[in-house]
Structure formats: structure tokens, C-alpha cells
Amino acid sequence: MVTFLSGGTGTPKLLDGAGAAFSPDEITVVANTGDDIELGGLFVSPDVDTLLFQGGGVLDRERWWGIRGDTHRTHSALSDIAAAADLPDGPQYLETSRQTEGRDIARWRRFSGIAEFMTIGDRDRAVHLTRTSLLDQGHTLSEATNVLADGFGLTIDVLPMSDDAVASLIHTEDGLMHFQEYWVAHRGEPTITNVEFRGSSTAEPAPGVLEALSDVVVIGPSNPVTSIGPMLALPGVARALMETPVVAVSPFLGDEAFSGPAADLMEAVGATPNTAGLATAYPFADAFVIDRDDPTEFDRPTIQTDIRIDSPEDAGRVIQAIDEALSILA
């Protein structure tokens, strides 16, 4: 049995090659929910949705988010209405008093739907409507995720990291921003001063998460701070990872991140913004998989291969390197 920690696009890309060493009934994926937001009253869980769409065979693999071939009529209409009514556009984070009203799971991540700042497709929106309705009926996020996973025909187990609210908030020189506001609306340009996972100290891992972490664990090439960091901030998770074999795949090619703001975020939290910084980000890791041209040296087993993932064949190659690392740890 193997458990993958997943956020962003890095680990989902890796999962394309999981069959090179693991069967679907052996795989559990724990997904980051720190990036989740409530947008116009709908609860959006981007990292969970990428796994749902990937497993269901409908993922837009050009962007690695959303549904392939989706239309955006509702999204466009929202922008048209806002423009016609002279309403503001861009991210509109609801005032503080509204952040703690309504669904507890949406605390500190509530945005207005006026001229929504994230592009949401029409079929994609149907998923959010279903999830939100299930939450309003009293289901937990885990239960709603199970329902959606069944609907998409997933053959692996997907667990959200928590059924409680954990908001990844980025403190910048331009003010406090939710991660989605920082990355989607502002394209990662504001200078970061700190990163906060609000709610993590009182949140609990979702049912099944700690049990899954008793198996061998693979951390894919996801952003160590905002994709994996929210999970590590949950009570009991870091301790569980200290007690089980963990292999981490570098999200860097030398000093360059595969994608996203990983380097800036690592620097903001005091970690070296390259592969060497993984020793600080993942002190519990027992082995690393890094690029074949990466000169980084660790004081623990390190497997080198071409870690660039542009196809399922590439992913399979990296999975085989992970399997090699696990065999050393066995």
C-alpha cells in the first residue's frame, strides 16, 4: 500500500505513471484543501477536483485544471453583468465579519462571485454545486468527495486532508491574500513576507488520513509550502510521517521550480529555494528522488533520474525511481 500527498499539478502528473509500480487498489491520495475557497457561495476544492477529473478521464491536460472541452458561458455572463452594472471586478475577499459566517468549512476563504476572478467552466461548476449541496445537507467534505469520486469512476482512494477549514493565507507587502488571490489574480507577483495556514492548529485530519500515513508515503513534485505545507500543519501528520518510510520527489530542476511560486514561497518561510531546501521542508523524508543533473547531496538515500514529467511515460520513469528508493528503505 502507498499513500501520495498531492497538491497543485505535480503529484497528479506523477500519478499518471503510478501503474509502473503500483496497482490502483494499493493507492491512496491525500489532497491539499488549503487552496479551497468559497466563491459566490459555491465551495471549490481545486486540488481535489484535479484528481477527480484526472481519474474520471476528463481533465484538461493542457492546463491541468478544469474539464477538457468545457464551456464558460456562466463565467462570461458574470463578467458581462458586472461590467454592465458598473460593479467592481477582480477578487473581492468578503469582510472579516462575513468570513466566519455560514459554512464553517469556508472560514477565511470567502469571496464574492461578482465577476468571479477564477475561471470556472460550466461542467466544472456543476461539480461545485453538487459538492456545496452535499455540504449543506450535512455531509462532510470527505463524504462529498467520496460521492463525487464514485460519480467519476475513480479506481484509487482520494481523501481530502481535513473536513475542517484550513485557509492558506499569504502575507505580502500589498496586504493579506488568500493563496488563490495571490496566485490567480495577482499571478504571484506581490512580495511575500509570511505564509499562514489559518485554522490548521485546531483542524483534524480527515477520517482515514492518519491511517493512510501508516503506509509508505510518497510526496510528489508539488509545491512544498502551499501544496504540502497545509497537510504538515495538521495535528499528528508530521509525527505520523516521522514513523513511516517517506520518499520525496523534488519539484526543482536545479534551482528552477517546475512551475508555480515554489521558490518564492520557500524563501519566504526560511527554506533554501531549491532542491537542497527539501531537507528543511521535509525533515522526516527518508529518501529523495532528484533530477539526474542536480548536484544536491543529502545525508540519506538519493535516486537520480530525469524528473521532468511531460507524459505518462515520463511519470512511469519517476515512479520506478520512487520504487527503487522504497526498496532501499525496506
Image: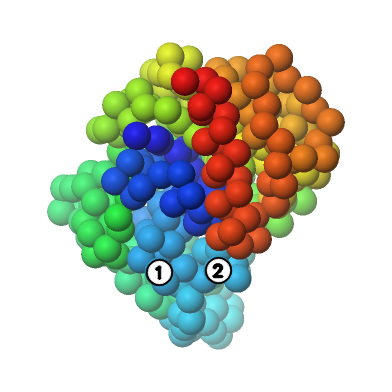
Which color mode does the image show?
A: rainbow
Q: In the image, is 254 to the left or to the right of 62?
A: right
Q: Residue at x 55, y 68 (%)?
A: 61
Q: Quadrant of residue 159?
A: top left
The image shows residue 34, relative to residue 214, as above or below, that is below
Near-viewer residue (266 or 78): 266
Q: Residues within 10 Å of mark 2 (few under 14, many from 20)?
A: some
Q: Residue at x 68, y 26 (%)?
A: 302
Q: Residues within 10 Å of mark 1 (few under 14, many from 20)?
A: some
Near-viewer residue (76 or 71): 71
Residue 165 in percent (x, y) is at 38, 38
The image shows residue 114, relative to residue 297, as above or below, that is below
Give the residue at mark 2: 61
Q: In the image, is 149 to the left or to the right of 232?
A: left
Given the image, on which type of amino acid does mark 2 rest? Arg
Give the residue at mark 1: 57
Residue 50 visible at all:
yes
Residue 242 in percent (x, y) is at 48, 15
In the structure shown, which secondary structural element does the residue marked by tag 1 occupy?
loop
Q: Quadrant of residue 133?
A: bottom left
Given the image, on which type of amino acid does mark 1 rest? Gly
**Total marks in image:** 2
Residue 116 visible at all:
no
Residue 137 in percent (x, y) is at 15, 53
Q: Residue at x 52, y 64 (%)?
A: 65
Near-viewer residue (82 or 306): 306
Quarter holding the N terminus is top left
Residue 312 in percent (x, y) is at 56, 60
In the structure shown, which secondary structural element does the residue marked by tag 2 occupy?
loop
Q: CA distance from mark 1 to mark 2?
A: 10 Å
Question: On residue 144, which mark appears?
Answer: none
Q: Residue at x 65, y 21 (%)?
A: 301
